[in-house]
Image (spheres, grey):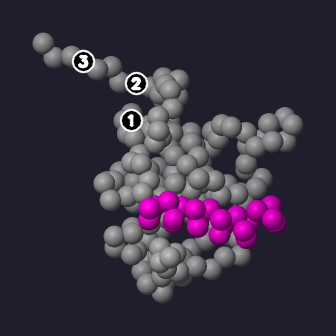
């Protein structure tokens, strides 16, 4: 006799214990992110520090690693979630909130070797469909970056291409510069 598995709702998923690495819920499916490895960790750390170095002192935006964002009937954990300053959820005392029940303004994903490019791109397209201004899917094995623009338009950037950045962040990066961070 076959066992019937009842689909889980987003609310039920959010009641589950957190996993390490994080699990995501999108389109009624639960999937666990892979454990980050060297290239992934290096790129993630450099992106967070580079964006915050420019955007945080001027209170333009804040980049946060591995932040759970719940919106549009799903909950995703981008490798880097960037929120415009005025959209950062805060507690009554003014501290940063623990729950982010909104889309990031800029979502960055770094593809790990064992990850499905389609699944990660699906998450970025969900973000785009629900208000995210810009998504990046960094492809280390191909030394390219897919940019997801409004209306789910996808563009492949390579080598000396200048990467799109959300407005008001005074930052200019090329694809080569991102991948040069891997040379230590």
Any magenta on residue 53?
A: yes
| Vertical placement of residue 59 versus 159, above or below | above
Q: Residue at x 40, y 54 (%)?
A: 120
Of the pair 154 and 116, the residue shown nearer to us = 116
Q: Residue furthest right?
A: 93
Badge 3 marks a residue whose secondary structure is loop
Q: Main secondary structure of the magenta part?
A: helix
Which comes sooner in the sequence, label 2 or label 1?
2
Badge 2 marks a residue whose secondary structure is loop
Which comes sooner in the sequence, label 1 or label 3?
3
Q: Residue at x 65, y 69 (%)?
A: 50
Badge 1 marks a residue whose secondary structure is strand
Identify the magenta region: 38-60
Side (left or right) of 166 relative to 10: right
Label drawn at residue 30: 1
Distance between the Cα atoms at labels 1 and 3?
17 Å
Residue 27, quarter of the rendered image:
top left
Please identify, in this view, whether the residue under mark 2 or under mark 1 is nearer the observer.
Answer: 1
Label drawn at residue 8: 2
Position of residue 23 measured from the top left corner of the image (x, y, whole percent): 44, 38
């Amino acid at each position: 006799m076959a066992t019937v598995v009842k689909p889980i709702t987003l609310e039920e998923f959010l009641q589950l214990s957190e996993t390490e690495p994080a699990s995501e819920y999108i389109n009624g499916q639960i999937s666990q992110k892979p454990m980050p490895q060297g290239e992934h960790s290096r790129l993630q750390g450099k992106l967070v520090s580079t964006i915050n170095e420019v955007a945080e002192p001027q209170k333009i935006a804040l980049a946060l690693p591995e932040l759970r964002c719940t919106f549009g009937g799903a909950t995703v954990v981008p490798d880097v979630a960037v929120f415009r300053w005025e959209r950062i959820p805060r507690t009554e005392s003014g501290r940063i909130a623990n729950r982010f029940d909104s889309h990031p303004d800029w979502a960055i994903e770094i593809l790990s070797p064992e990850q499905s490019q389609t699944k990660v791109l699906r998450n970025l397209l969900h973000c785009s469909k629900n208000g995210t201004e810009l998504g990046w899917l960094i492809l280390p094995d191909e030394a390219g970056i897919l940019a997801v623009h409004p209306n789910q338009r996808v563009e492949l950037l390579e080598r000396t291409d200048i990467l799109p950045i959300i407005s008001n962040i005074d930052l200019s990066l090329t694809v080569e510069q991102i991948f040069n961070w891997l040379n230590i």
